[in-house]
Image: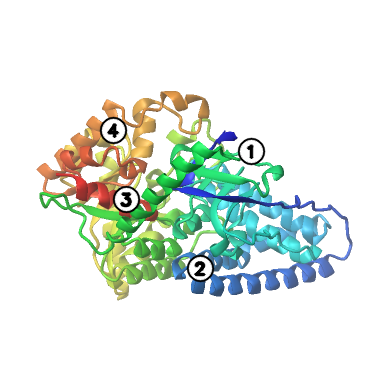
Amino acid sequence: MERYTGKKIYEGIAIGKIAYLGKKEQVVERKHTEDSEGEKRRYESAREEAISQLRALYEKTKTEIGEADAEIFDVHAMMLEDDGYNDSVYNIIEAQKMNAEYAVAVTGDNFAETFASMDDEYFKARSVDVKDISERVIRILTGEGEASVDATVPSILVADDLTPSETVQLDKSKILAFVTRKGSSNSHTAILARTMNIPAIINIDVNESWNGKMGILDSDKNIFIVDPDETTMKMYEALLDEQNQKKQLLQDLKGKPTETKSGKSIMLYANVGNLSDIASALQYDAGGIGLFRSEFIYLGKETYPTEEEQFAIYRKAAELMAGKKVIIRTLDIGADKQCDYFELGHEENPAMGFRAIRICLKRPEVFKTQLRALFRAAAYGNIYIMYPMITSMSEISQIKKIVAEVKAELEEQGVPYKDAPQGVMIETPAAAVITDLLAKEVDFFSIGTNDLTQYTLAIDRQNAALDDFCDTHHEAVLRLIKMTVDNAHAAGIWAGICGELAADTSLTKTFLEMGVDELSVAPPSVLKVRKIVRDCD
């Protein structure tokens, strides 16, 4: 019996034979060519074929898993229609006189690197999506086939890595669990694993020799066992029965209120980054969107998104939620989230640098474009606007002045719009300490615990060497949360949490006792948090 330790991306226990998915490393040749026009035609043909394949995957996923997860492939197809991506490929082919495969590989690597360098786990995970579409185009250009697994009975799939498209093309009836060496908890593959209710674990140094052996995955304990002994097997068979009973109980919570036994209710919302995530939020029965990361609209582009482009996305989000609250965070670019066209320049300490609301206030033309789109979209649903990285009352005054100008311009131009409640993120100690003042000027607070923890504890969350010092339950952080909630209530407004702590079920009871009004979590965590709330007195 061999035992390995990894990292959970979806909880659960699985028992079964191991099926190894072997994949050849994609090797792209760098070839000089004078026929740039011919290479561009080859790329265009491969790109169109890739989009066609992605449309087919969309339909397959929609039928077999659901529309929410099918949107992943719609987003992938949109990436292949992105001007920035295509311009980069064409530029490498033409300016460097390179073959199409190489141009796609370099472009994919550059875009993936941009996403991977971000400290926001959600955006970091998007690097896998860019690699997935690039590899698809290269496979079409080179005539390579896709990797497949040969499993005749339900098995634990073991692979070096899995892309979203590989994941959905697997026969679900034959997959008991995923075990991979690479991956992240925010990848679309992880999201698919959660949707398909399949236990998964990453960071395991997988081995082809395991193919055909028995395996046990216990992602709750982050372990994978190969060739278990009889005692271990019997113990896990009993745990598996227990797990299946609990899963059914969670599904039964859909449609039920998020309230304690004594009747105290709390708003339970979802964090999303794009329209496809909204479908996922609805699938998991979220009561609203507590954090819509609008920066996704700006990333990976060659220039600023237009007002109309943004308006269409915000309006769609509002319509999809059909009257439920949609809290949209204004531009939070800078620091780890960089767009070349912003020309922000290098900073020695970007986490404390020119980012988020600071950019908006210094570049009001960019801010106004987004605000116009938001107020116009508010007419189609229940949109709330939230400002990130607030540290002072002066910033609130400046925001209000710009908002007033935007509304006056819309009225003067006869453009329909609707007022929207406006709140701020409490993610700096400065903001938390002045919440008594801020609460008199805004409609709500949402606490961003990731940055609040980083700044309060003086811990760079990009620095893995400091992990042992990063105590997310630190008394200082909890006191700032309590202070924020108290000051909000004293002024008659509500306060929520949209950072990762909101999904930490070991703190759910504490947050209820503090009087937190709203928790916003990743869609798959909604029902788990609801269960904890309903179990509380």
Q: Separation of disc 3 and disc 4 at Cα?
A: 32 Å
> Mark 3: which secondary structure?
helix
Q: CA distance from mark 4 to mark 1?
A: 44 Å
Mark with earlier residue (3, 4) = 4
Task: Compare marks 3 and 1 and give the one earlier in the sequence.
Answer: 1
The residue singled out by tag 1 in the image is: 205
Closest to the camera, between mark 1 and mark 2, is: 1
Label 4 vs 1, first from the N-terminus: 1
The residue singled out by tag 4 in the image is 430
Label 1 amino acid?
Answer: Asp
Residue closer to the observer: 114 or 345? 114
The residue lying at 52 percent from left, 63 percent from top is 72
Task: Specify whether 147 is left or right of 537.
Answer: right
Q: Is residue 334 visible?
A: no
Residue type at the position of mark 3? Lys
Q: Secondary structure at mark 1?
A: loop
Colour scheme employed for the rendering of this structure: rainbow
Which of the two labelled residues, at mark 2 and mark 3, occupies the earlier sequence position? 2
- Looking at the image, which residue is at 50% across and 33% down? 462
Disc 2 target residue: 70
